[in-house]
Image (cartoon, rainbow, N blue to C red):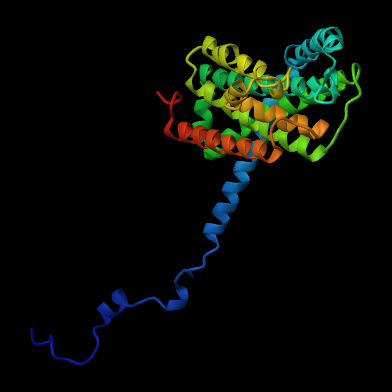
Amino acid sequence: MSNLKPNSSEPINSLESTNSLEPINSLEPINSPEPIKNITLMNSLNMVALRTMWRKECLRFLRIWIQTLLPPAITMSLYFVIFGNLIGSRIGNMGGFSYMEFIVPGLIMMAVITNAYSNVSSSFYSAKYQRNIEELLVAPVSNWIIIAGFVGGGVARGMLVGIIVTIVSLFFVDIQIHNLLIIFVTLLLTTILFSTAGLINGIFANSFDDVSIVPTFILTPLTYLGGVFYSLSLLPEFWQWVSKINPIVYMVSGFRFGFLGESDINFYVSLGILIGFNVVLLGWAYSLINRGVGIRS
């Protein structure tokens, strides 16, 4: 007890070793490169996932090209023969152009819409049915990448079908091109829009029959009433107004303007409608996948 010196001014060595502070230089700097490395790694993983998914989607429809690429070419050839040559010769000019020239952009757009939609809706539902989608959900991949992978496959198929139908149309009529950039932008936005719509259909579908309901009972009627075979100026004023509720009218009109330089609706209005629908549907698709609607049990 006599050895204890509570009032001693000397430091206690045992406490000095345990409570000593590390030098400031030994602390990890605030601007550590680790977060940057993690972000770079995640971006790299996302790009690998996107390339893999897009390649898989493209190979899927290229492998069965007899079912995916050949039918649109044959179907559109029949349209060109029946509506263009047989009926078109009796109709005469439409908006200052031959009837065949008038319907070519609409027929191309019709094939593009149908194929972009059906590619994604069937592919996504097949992934759900085979439970492959669960592997994507547990992978360290952004939901936007999942959407982009499926939608990218639909865009590729829609674009390729559009090129094929355009080549087929050259056997029937000389195609005019007013503005190639307008054609490309309208085609790209349309394929993205209907690929996303097909994705949403695949999310909600509970059977393969559900996948075909929307194209049969909604998409096909809207396409035929979308100004593919006629000009809106031929309709009474009331029905012109009703037709403008149909979003496909704006796609066909904008696409036709790129070929002929003439359309029923101002191109910038069509462009704004297309962009607006794309934003809404992409946001909806992201929300559905993020919440696991129709995917997670």
Placement of the C terminus among the 4 image quadrants: top left
Question: In which image quadrant can residue 223 be found?
Answer: top right
- Foreground of the two, 177 or 266: 266
Q: Position of residue 221 (x, y in %)?
A: 61, 14
Q: Residue at x 67, y 26 (%)?
A: 57
Residue drawn at x 48%, y 32% as measured from the top left = 289
For this view, does 111 lie left or right of residue 214?
right
Identify which residue, 238 or 286, lies in the foreground.
238
List x then y, in percent, for residue 239: 60, 20
Expressed as whole percent of the image width and height from the top left, the position of residue 252 reads: 71, 27
Q: Residue furthest left?
A: 1
Q: Tell me if I can see residue 187 in this picture.
A: no
Give the side of residue 272 with respect to residue 34, left or right: right
- Residue 202's spot in the image, x, y percent? 54, 21
Residue found 57% across the figure and 47% down from its top:
42
Q: In the picture shown, does residue 244 fall above or below 3?
A: above
